[in-house]
Image (cartoon, rainbow, N blue to C red):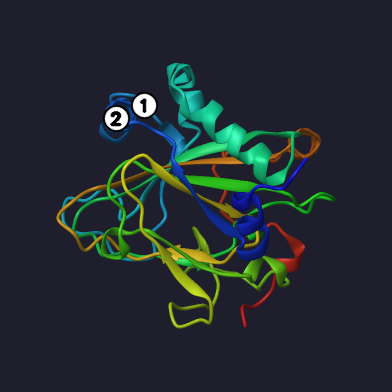
Amino acid sequence: METSARARTFERNGFAPTGRLLSPAEVQAYRDIYDRLLSGDIESGDKRSDLGSHVPLRDGARENITQIMWPSALHPEILELPLHDRALAVARELIGDDAVLDFDMLIHKDPHTGVPTPWHQDAAYWIDLPDSRAVSIWVALDEAVPDSGCMWYVSGSHRQPLRAHRPTSDGKNIETDCSEDEPGATAVPLAPGEAVAHSGGTLHYSRGNASDRTRRAYILNFRPAAMVRLEREQGADHGLRVNERTVRNSDAAGSAR
């Protein structure tokens, strides 16, 4: 089968815009569920955490950057909407027909929060696996531009060894040394309903939300079915039972350079 232009871009850069995955009406349906999770109307329990917990909270704020793992487990009705099927089709185009859903999550930034998501590579969070194929599909439910928190990637970083990662200052998340000045660093603005796919080894981050608008993102991760089975056999379920955010990949352990 001929490789698509999108797959060639993904292989070359480590990330690739997918185009529009959701219509405006579908975006609104996801926003409604998303906001129920944020408000607590749909309870998230220990699947909710703060990716910006190393920065002091603003008065009255619950989190700087809200992460909720496994929205599809917390609210299975979300699987009746189209995004999981459409994202799976993209994932199979990019990493192979054996791709299945590994996990999903929400990452939310309120207006004027200003706390960036630290630079990292997703694979640093993951256990060592014999097949490292993986793709995360980051879906914008609001306009995402640099100053509201769109994704930044370092082109080609997925073809380099994993960088050493370290815990953030509060020990609850991880980070590595990188900046927007890194050669190949690229911002990927998105309209609501559009998405960008990135590999597990691609360096990425997003700025804090300095805009007047909320920034809601829905992220779905896929990898080969055999690797998902192997993860689960070793107790790795990406927060389905315990929301643990530590360096687990041996190549990313140690002091960051």
Q: What kind of element bears circle 1?
A: loop
**Direction front: furthest residue:** 2
* Whether residue 116 can be seen here: yes
Q: How many numbered marks appear?
A: 2
Amino acid type, mark 1: Glu
Return the residue nearer the eye: 182 or 167.
Answer: 182
Q: Is residue 201 shown left or right of residue 23?
A: right
Q: Is residue 257 shown left or right of residue 109?
A: right
Q: Quadrant of the N terminus?
A: top right
Q: Which residue is mark 2?
A: 40
Q: Quadrant of the C terminus?
A: bottom right
Q: What kind of element bears circle 2?
A: loop
Q: Residue at x 27, y 32 (%)?
A: 35
Q: Position of residue 199 (x, y in %)?
A: 63, 55
Q: Quadrant of residue 112?
A: bottom left
Mark 1 Cα-neighbour bin, 10 Å: few <14, some 14–19, many ≥20: some
Amino acid type, mark 2: Gly
Tell me whether circle 2 and circle 1 mark residues in contact (CB < 8 Å).
yes
Q: Which residue is mark 1?
A: 43
* Whether residue 241 can be seen here: no
Q: Residue at x 36, y 39 (%)?
A: 193
Q: Position of residue 57 (x, y in %)?
A: 26, 59
Q: Residue at x 31, y 54 (%)?
A: 144
In space, the residues marked 2 and 1 are separated at their CA atoms by 5 Å
Q: Position of residue 253 (x, y in %)?
A: 70, 68
Q: Is residue 169 shown left or right of residue 189?
A: right
Q: Residue at x 69, y 69 (%)?
A: 162
